[in-house]
Image (cartoon, helix red, strand yellow):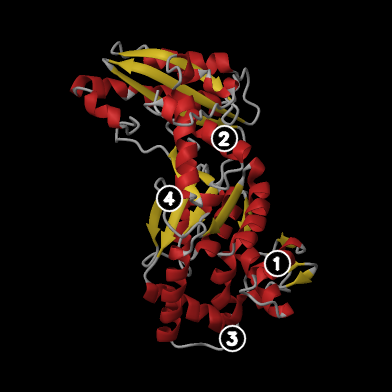
Amino acid sequence: FYGTPKNPDAHTVTQVLPPQLMRSPLCGRTRLGHFEGVATVVTKLLNLVRPNRAYFGRKDAQQLAILQQLVRDLNLGVEIVPCPIVREASGLALSSRNQYLNVGERQAAAVIYRSLQRAEALFRTGVLNSRDLITAVFAELASEPLVQPEYVELVHPQTLVPLETITEAGLLAIAAQVGSTRLIDNMILRTRRPIIAIDGPAGAGKSTVARQVAQQLDLLYLDTGAMYRAITWLMLHTGTDLQDEPAVAELVSQSQIRLTAVPTDGTASFPMPCQVWINGQDVTQVIRTEAVTSNVSAIAAQPSVRQALVQQQQHYGRNGGIVIDGRDIGTHVFPDAELKLFLTASVHERARRRQQDLKNQGQAVQSLEQIEQAIHRRDYQDSTRAIAPLRKAPDAIEIQTDALSADEVVAQIVALYQQMMGG
């Protein structure tokens, strides 16, 4: 049992006990004391380091759920960030234990993920009860005699309580013995419509593409950039000191942002992703000015602003069926999004697009060199900020847009979505 001092008579022995109902099912039946040790060691580590975020993989879903509950219960002030499962070409989840598999066992172990996929395909046809889904998994596993299941269970992803039927989400978890090696894997099945998360640097065409994807797939488009721009405009409009975080936090807490569809009757003076209102005032056009653009990254980096707006965004996405773009959607806001994209383009191309946008909006046009310098600064701010910096999610699909039109990018994303949905 790790986490206990070798000489308990000379040290204070502290053991962190996660909820019994979370540590006893699944792997807890055969790994007695394991999750108590994990909880104790991780608690000590977090208290020593005091990080803003701690990253844990989704492959060990029971450990992830326990640590998320631990942080909430002990008010540790750290965000537990789930990291997606990374897989080999065969679908086998990457693990240090895979090195113990011989060639035949490694090939056989791929059936574990295939069994999850078989259940997922059944789930997409409307089958929600655990008996049928688990039966489908066992049927696929039976095709590989080298793989001996230890358990196949359907539980709630957060509480780990066994489920008879999936109402919102279910964690389908497997542990199996392959030769002398014990492997685990899982998949979350959600009844919500999928979320499409589109990330990337400024000027990569995210909002244009996201809006068109939402229209073609009949999903809700949520313009997160506009939300941050609206707050930034309000700060400038009211003369609030952008560096005065308490003042910013108070203003944000009293602000209400509303997004509505752009009028189709020709009253909009130039194309925008959506109409943006803050405290009842239409700020659709003014949030695109250079003053707002040059300050929005600094505002977005403030914890109070991010916390308030991320909560609003996650509320929108609770039932799924949205397309959402930004800098940290797939890594922070919706790490469990079903389809993640990372749109990017060269600095020169993004500057050219920005210059054209300014012309279309009738605003003062800067030189390409000036715009490129501003984009370089923006990229640096976005990628180095302490809170949820810009980075590509490990499971995101990157699309380089320099040589592509918006329609071509949209077509790629729609095709990926339809492929994911089995269409």
Q: CA distance from mark 2 to mark 3?
A: 52 Å
Question: How far apart are the two marked residues, 3 and 4, measured between alpha carbons?
Answer: 35 Å
**CB within 8 Å, label 1 to label 2:** no
**What residue is pinned by disc 3?**
363
Which residue occupies the extreme right position in the image? 280
Report if the CB atoms under discs 2 and 3 are less than 8 Å apart.
Answer: no
Q: Counting residues from the N terminus, which is met first, the one under dot 1 or under dot 4?
A: 1
Image coordinates of residue 257 in percent, x first then y, are: 73, 62
Q: Which residue is mark 4?
A: 393
User: In percent of the image, x 32 and y 25: which residue is there?
Assistant: 110
Residue 99 horizontal/vertical position (percent) = 23, 28
324 in relation to 10, above or below:
below
Of the residues under marks 3 and 4, which one precedes in the sequence?
3
Determine whether 2 is above or below 306 in the image. above
Q: Give the residue number, with chain letter if any, for mark 2.
A: 70
CB under 8 Å between discs 2 and 4: no
* N-terminal-most mark, 1 or 2: 2
Amino acid on which the number 3 mark rests in the picture: Gln
Indicate left or right for 132 with 236 as reference: left
The image quadrant that residue 399 belongs to is: bottom left
Could you tell me which secondary element the residue under label 1 belongs to? strand
Marks 2 and 4: which is nearer the front?
Answer: 2
Spatial CA distance of label 3 from label 1 is 19 Å
Residue linked to disc 1: 276
Q: Are marks 3 and 4 in contact (CB under 8 Å)?
A: no
Residue type (three-letter) at the residue carrying disc 2 = Leu
Answer few, some or many: residues within 10 Å of disc 4's Cα (few below 14, many 20 plus, some between 14 and 19). Answer: many
